[in-house]
Amino acid sequence: MSRIEKKFIEMKRRGQAALIPFITAGDPDLPTTLKIMRALEAGGADAIELGIPFSDPSADGPTIQRSSERALKNPISLPAIFQLVREFRKASELPIILFGYYNPFFRFGLDKFASEAAQAGADGVLCVDLPPEESGELKSCTDRRDLDVIFLLSPTSGADRRSLVARHGRGFIYYVSVTGVTGARQTFDVDLRRQVAQVRRATKLPVGVGFGISTPKQAAWIAEFADAAVVGSALVQRIEQAKSKADKVKQAGDFVAQLKRAMTAARKKT
Amino acid sequence: MPLKVPDRRGHFGPYGGRYVAETLMPALAELQRGYATVRRDAGFKRELAYYLKEYVGRATPLYFAERLTRSLGGATVYLKREDLCHTGAHKINNTMGQILLARHMGKHRIIAETGAGQHGVATATVAARFGMECEIFMGAEDVQRQSLNVFRMKLLGAKVRVVESGSRTLKDAMNEALRDWVTNVRTTYYLIGSVAGPHPYPMMVRDFQSVIGREARRQILQKEGRLPDYLLACVGGGSNSMGLFFPFVKDKAVKMLGVEAAGLGLESGKHSATVQRGAVGVLHGSKSYLLQDDKGQVMETHSVAAGLDYPGVGPELSYLRDQGRVQFDSATDEEAIASIRFLAEVEGIIPALESAHAIAVVRRLAPKLKKRQIIIVNLSGRGDKDMITVGDYLGVKL
C-alpha cells in the first residue's frame, strides 16, 4: 500500500480532510525548499505536492510561472530533486507527489525516472499534460513500483472521462475546481459540491480539489465535501513575497497552519 | 510504412497524440467530431472551395522561374506562388478552413498564436470576414520585429495580446493561447496555425494546407507531363511543407526536402533546426522532435525569420523523417537574407524571410542537377512584412 493510500485511510478514520500544499522545488533554492517542506509538515500538511519546474508551464497562471522561472535560474535536475526527497524522507513519512509537466520525466527516461523516484521516497506523480490516453508508457514503469500516477478531472469532463480516470487513476483523483489555469481566485462555482459528488459516484478513490484555493475560509468549505484541498498559488505567492529565506520558511509554515486549523474546525462542525 | 496516419488517437507512429490538460480533452474530442463531420460533407467542401477561389485567390500559379533556372545552371525550378494568396502567405488556406469549421461548431470567439504575424493576420482576416471576435497572442520580441503585421491585425479588428513570458516568441505565445483556451474553452475556438499541437490539429491543418500540393501536382503534370524530382519547403512548425509534401507522399520517386533555420549556424547553438538537432519530447500537446536540453527544458531558439523561430515541429514531419521519406537541410540567417536579394534581382519576386530559406537551398541544389530534373519550391510567403528586418540586417535605415 502506498503512503498516499495509507494517508487517506488515516484521514478518513480521523474524520478529517487532507491539506496538500504545493511548492516549486528549487524556488528560491533546493536547501530552502527542504526547510519549507519541514515547515509545511510542522504546520499540519498531510502530503506535499512538489512542483518540478518546467520552461513552458502552459497550464499555470502567473504566480507559478514566475516560481518556475526562479527555480530554473539555478541549475536544477531530477537527480537533485530526488536527493531533496531522500533528505526529507529521512525524518518524515509524509506522502510526496511530484507535480509537473511530462517532458522532463520523459526526457530523463521513464523507467529510470520511476525507479529513482520510488527509491528516493516519492509516492505519486502527476503530469498536468498527461491524460490517461497517453499514460501507458509511464504507467508501465510506475505501476509495478509504489508510485501512484494521479489523474485530473475538471468541470468540462463528462461521464466518459470520469469513468476513464476512475479506471486508470491511483492514489486519489485531483478535481480541478475551475476551468482555467492555476492561480488564486475570489470565488468558486457554487456547483462545486455537486460536481465533486458526481466524481465520487464514479470512483472509490479519494477526491482532492485544487486550483484557486487561497484562503482558510475557502479551504474549510472544500473540507466539508472533499477528501483533500490542494493549495498552490496562494502559498507560492507568500513564499515569493517574503524577503529573507528564513521568512519564506516561516510564512509557509504559518499559512499552512492557518489553513489546517480552518479545515479541521469545518469538519468538526459538520 | 503504414498508409493511414494518424491513427484514431492522432498518432503518427510514436509521434503526435494529445498531451494536454484534462480540461481541454473534451474540447479536442468535440473538435475531432466537428472536423470529421465537415470533412465528409459535400456542402462544406463546396463552401471552402468557393472562398479559396473567390476570396483567397486560388489556384496560385506554379511559376516556371526561367531566369532563376538559367542563373543556377542546373535543374528546372518552379515556384509555387503561395505569396500571391490574399494576406501574402499560405497561412490563409488553413484559417479559411478552420473558421468555416468554427462557424459550423457554433463558436464565436477565435484565438490564435502567431510568430511572424502571418498566421495572426490570416486569422484576423477571416475573423473579420465572418464577423467573429478575435484575439491574437504574440511574443513581445516578435511584436517588435514584425510591427507591420501587428498593425495589420489591429486594423482588421483583432485584439493583439503581447506575451512577455519566457523567451517572448512563438512558443510562449502558444503557451498563453493554451492558457486562454483552457479558461474560455466553452465559448472559444483555438485556431492553431501549424501542423503542431494536439490531435486533431496536425492532421486537420495538413489537410487544409494540402491544397498547395494538390494544385502543384496537377499543374506540374500539365506543364511537364511528369512529376517533379524534388520538393523544397522551409520548416518551422511545418504547415507549408506538409501542405506541399502530403499529396506526393506516395510518389516514391519524388524527393522531399525540408529546410530548417540554421540561424547563426548549426554549431552556434543559435538556430531553430528542430529535426536535425532536437531529441524526441512533448510540447504544446504532441510528441515530436524538440529542441531541448538534457534535462528536458525547452531551449530558446533563434532565426532571423520569426515564422521559423520555434523549438518544435509537426509530428508528421518527425514521422516522415524517421521513415526516410523527408530529408532535411538548413540555411543560415545570412543565406536567407542573401537569397531575398537574389530572388528579387533575378525574378522580381521578394520572398518572405521564411521562404528565403528554401531559396537558399535551391541555390545549392539546382546546380548539381541536370536540366531535365525538376524542383518545385514552395514560395510560402512574400517579403513585404520583412522589409524592416532586412533593412536592419543590411544596415539600411528605412
Image (cartoon, coloured by chain):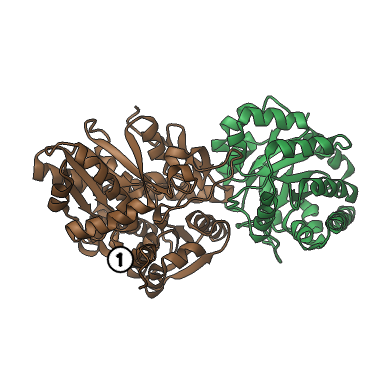
Quarter of the image with the C terminus of chain B is bottom left
**Residue at left offset 20%, top offset 63%:** B54
Place residue B133 in its image quadrant: bottom left
Say which of B91 and A75 sits in front.
A75
Q: Position of residue A80 (x, y in %)?
A: 73, 38
Q: Farthest residue to the front: give it.
A: B395
Say which of B304 and A55 sits in front.
B304
Q: Colour of chain A?
A: green
**Residue at left offset 24%, top offset 30%:** B252
For this view, does B10 lie left or right of residue A33? Answer: left
Residue B358 seen anywhere in this rendered image of the structure:
yes
Residue A226 seen anywhere in this rendered image of the structure:
no
Q: Farthest residue to the top: give it.
A: A144
Say which of B390 and B1 sits in front.
B390
At label 1, counting other C-alpha atoms closer than 10 Å, the crowd grade (few under 14, some 14-19, many 20 or more) is some
Judged from the image, the secondary structure of the residue bearing numbered disc 1 is helix
**Residue at left offset 78%, top offset 63%:** A241
Q: Position of residue B161 (x, y in %)?
A: 50, 67
Q: Colour of chain B?
A: brown
Which of the chains bears the disc numbered 1?
Answer: B
Place residue B292 in its image quadrant: top right
For this view, does B68 lie left or right of residue B361? Answer: left
Q: How many marks?
A: 1
Q: Position of residue B246 (x, y in %)?
A: 29, 41
Q: Position of residue A220 (x, y in %)?
A: 82, 57
Quarter of the image with the N terminus of chain B is top left
**Residue at left offset 41%, top offset 43%:** B314
Residue B262 versus residue B87 in the image, above or below: above
**Residue at the disc numbered 1:** B384
For this view, does B219 lie left or right of residue A199? Answer: left
Of the residues shown, which amino acid type is indicated by label 1?
A: Asp
Place residue B153 in its image quadrant: bottom left
